[in-house]
Every structure is written in structure tokens, then in C-alpha cells.
Image (spheres, rainbow, N blue to C red):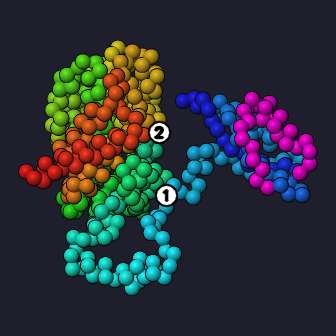
Amino acid sequence: MQNQHIIRNFIVETPSKPGNFAKVATAIGMAEGDIGDISTLKSGALTTIRDISITCKSEAQLQQVIDNIETIGNGVKIHAVTDDVLKAHEGGKIAMKSRLDVRSLGDLQRIYTPGVASVCMEIVNYPEKANYFTSIGSSVAIVTDGTAILGLGNIGSVAGMPVMEGKAVLLDQFVGLSGVPILLNTSDPDEIVETVKHIHQGFGAILLEDIGSPHCFEIEERLKAELPIPVMHDDQHGTAVVALAAILSACKSTGVDPKKAVIGQIGLGAAGLAICRMLMAYGIDEVYGLDRQEEAQDRLIHYGGKTKSSLEELMQTCDIIVATTGVSGLIKPEMIRSGQIILALSNPNPEILPTEAIAAGAAFAADGRSVNNVIGFPGIFKGALDAGASDITYPMLIAAATAIVNHTKPGELIPNPLDPMLHHLVARAVEEAANMEMNK
Ligand SMILES: NC(=O)C1=CN([C@@H]2O[C@H](COP(=O)(O)OP(=O)(O)OC[C@H]3O[C@@H](n4cnc5c(N)ncnc54)[C@H](O)[C@@H]3O)[C@@H](O)[C@H]2O)C=CC1
Ligand SMILES: CC(=O)C(=O)O
Ligand SMILES: [Mg+2]
């Protein structure tokens, strides 16, 4: 996949003599790099260090810029080449902050000892007040074992921390919940279940993230059964909610009855199996799955789903294709039938680019940047917590999908994740569904 705009920041040291920066600028220009902002980080008697922002059109061009600067010699050195994404992550993306200021001894005594002791005793006497007098009820543990970070595979939970911090940022900014990453150094289901059980009481809900299949299924099932608070594996159900919403919107736009649509799901891991289960729970009969692993296909059959024997057969026979394999470029343009709806949801790179799918004849196409569980999970957790629900159920998830569809503009597949109303509406729909279930 060709990148069109690669922005990198070059930290370059030059001897502090006139003309040296001009040599660097010429070297960049010779490689057709485009110079943006320049800031001087250090201006010493002997050397000067500058941070130069350079835009390139390809990795090869970027390498040429580096080579050209490095061949200048005479004390010109590149200390680092950083990108703006990495820069945005410097120091991490989240921090635990206090809501109250400590400006006086009175504040200190109210917020901490001795005043705090009376609040502790209030909770001892009335345990249900813990949610009122602490942040527990608005805190969500974001738990990963690092075994399926995006489509990058088993890269470990520390390498997955930027994703977990990202989820925490979204919970905070979209619905005002505090997400706390919990990085596990085990992928053993028994150990994960035990660990989460031991820490759960500090949280209002548990969001399982990027835990690979098949162990994610057992872990979620056991935690849902054993914990008194909502537990949801976002890659399963958050993704399934958003996929269902996108499919319903596409059907609306094309005049197709979704219950009569023939849907093919490629990849039956965490996301794929849950998408099939969600579509079947919604009442769609013709849902076919395909996975390179037989046991994944058997799992779908166990839930009442059907399978196809090859990618070619699935692409030939289904009207709507959803792919969550983590395999970039798996769907070739020549496999697409005119009028098909293609949701290639793998991150960071989809099974086919939406532009390629449309050029090949698809009626609608989207990738995992737009059809992304960010549309659903903030509101789902907020709604469940506001309702005081102890579980996240299919009626709550279907209510979330319906709220998303109702908030999608005609002709579009999915709303803008930055629309402030979206997460509010999802939360209210989930809360209402939870209340209805609790009052049954
Ligand atoms: N857009 C979104 O909101 C989301 C996207 N995803 C993406 O979906 C992808 C998969 O994620 P998970 O389901 O968590 O991973 P997973 O590892 O649980 O599942 C992947 C499944 O795809 C199957 N597979 C791989 N290559 C295949 C092929 N050539 N043909 C058929 N099946 C194949 C694997 O056997 C496995 O069962 C990742 O790239 C992830 O980023 C996941 C969750 C949310
Ligand atoms: C979006 C997400 O959760 C994933 O790609 O894994
Ligand atoms: Mg994920």
C-alpha cells in the first residue's frame, strides 16, 4: 500500500557556521522532500540542533532524504527521525488526575486524613455507597493479554499499551469514563479470569481488548458469569454492533430487506464469530462464515451458523461481505461482484481498500477506520453503567446498533465518531434497554 503523505521530523545537528543549514535544505530538496516547520532546539557555540518537519510521498523518497543528509558529512548528523504519530505518544496519552485541588491544610484534611476515614466507614456501613463516594462506578478496566493487538498478532500487552491508552482516551472524551489499562503477562485463561476477579472491585465494568481467539471466548464467558459487573470483549461485541449497524444502513440505502440478505463473514475469530452471532440474533438467516481454521468454522456451526468451503465461493454467493482476518489485501478486486457491499474491517490495513472495492463494482465499501468499534463501545459502557446493569446483553447491544443506524445520515454507512450526540444516543438506548430487562 502506497503512503501518500509521510510526515517525519528530523532532528539534525550541524556545525554552528553559516551555510550549514543551507546544505541540509539542499540535500532535502534534491530528494524532493518538502520542508515544513523548522524549530531550533539548541543553538550552541559549536553545534546547532534543529527539528525539521519533512513531508515525503513514499518510504523510498524518505530514505533518499536520509541518505542525502547523511552524505553531507563535516559534522552534519541526523540524531533521530520521528513521526508525528510517535510524537503524539511521547509520555503516553493518559494520566490519572485529581478532581480536587489541595490548596490548604483544610483541603488536605478533607481529601485525605483524617477526614477520609469517615468516608471509609460510611462505605463499611453502607457498601452500596462505594459507587457514590468513589470513582469506582465510572472506571473501566481495559484488560489485555496482548495476544491479538489489532491485526498485528501476539505482540504482547506492553506493545499493545498504545491501543489500550487510545481506548481510555476515547472513553474519557466521548462519555466521561475513566479507562484504566491492565496489561497482563499471562494468556492462560485460568490466570486471566482469576486476575480479573481479584481486581474487579476497583472498577464499574471490564472491557476486554485484543485478547486472541479462541481463549477470548472462554475468558469472556467465565467473567460474565462470575462477576457482578458488566464485562464485554470489545473486539467481539463492540465490533459486532457496529458491523450490524453498517449492514442495516447499507440495506436501507439499497432497499434490501436485511433479514433476506445473504451475508458472508471472512475470518471467524473474536470479531468474526461475534458478528455472525449478532446478525443471527438480529434475525438474519443467511449468514455464512469462512475461516482457515476448521475449529473456528465448527464454533460457528455450534452457534447455528453455516459455512462456505472457499473464499471464492463466499465472494460469489454473498451480497454483503464482512472481513476480519487481519490479512491485508486478502480480497482481490476481481473477486468482487457488481453491487456487493464490502466491509473489510481489519486494522491497521483492510482486506481491500474501499476505493479499490468501489472501482471493482461494489455498491458500498468501508474499512476498519470508519466501521470501527469506537462507534459503539463508549456508549455501550456508559449506558450499562448508568443503568446499574450487571451484564451487557444482546437486547442492549441491538439497541446500541439501532441507535447508531437512526443517527446515520441517509446514504452513509456509519456516523462520524466525533459527533458528540452519537455516543450520548447510544448510551441512552443501552440504558433504556438495560432498564427494560431489569424490570422484566
Ligand atoms: N474495525 C474494527 O472495529 C475492528 C477490527 N478488528 C480487526 O479484525 C482483525 C481480526 O481481529 P480478531 O477477530 O480480534 O482476531 P482473531 O485472531 O481472533 O481472528 C482472526 C481470524 O481470521 C482467520 N483468518 C486469518 N487469515 C484468514 C484467511 N486467509 N482466510 C480465512 N480466515 C482467516 C483466523 O484463523 C482467525 O480465526 C484484526 O485486524 C483487527 O484489527 C477487530 C476488532 C474491531
Ligand atoms: C478497533 C479494534 O479494536 C481492533 O482493530 O482491534
Ligand atoms: Mg481491538
Q: Quadrant of residue 185?
A: bottom left
Residue range of the region highlighted in magenta in the rendering: 16-42
377 drawn magenta: no
Between 411 and 109, the one nearer to me in the picture: 109
- Dot 2 or dot 1: first in sequence order is 1
Q: Does residue 278 appear in the picture of this structure?
A: yes
- At 75% from the left and 47% from the top, the residue drawn is 39
Q: Residue 281: horizontal and vertical position, in percent?
A: 17, 38
Relative to residue 362, is residue 408 depicted above or below? below
Q: Amino acid at mark 2?
A: Pro
Residue 111 position (above or below residue 374):
below
Return the residue nearer the eye: 315 or 274: 274
- Mark 2 lies on residue: 348
Q: Are marks 2 and 1 in contact (CB under 8 Å)?
A: no
Distance from mark 2 CB to nearest ligand 1 atom below 8 Å? yes
Please name the residue that numbered disc 1 is placed on: 94
**Identity of the residue drawn at 38% across and 31% down:** 344
Percent x, y of residue 107: 45, 78
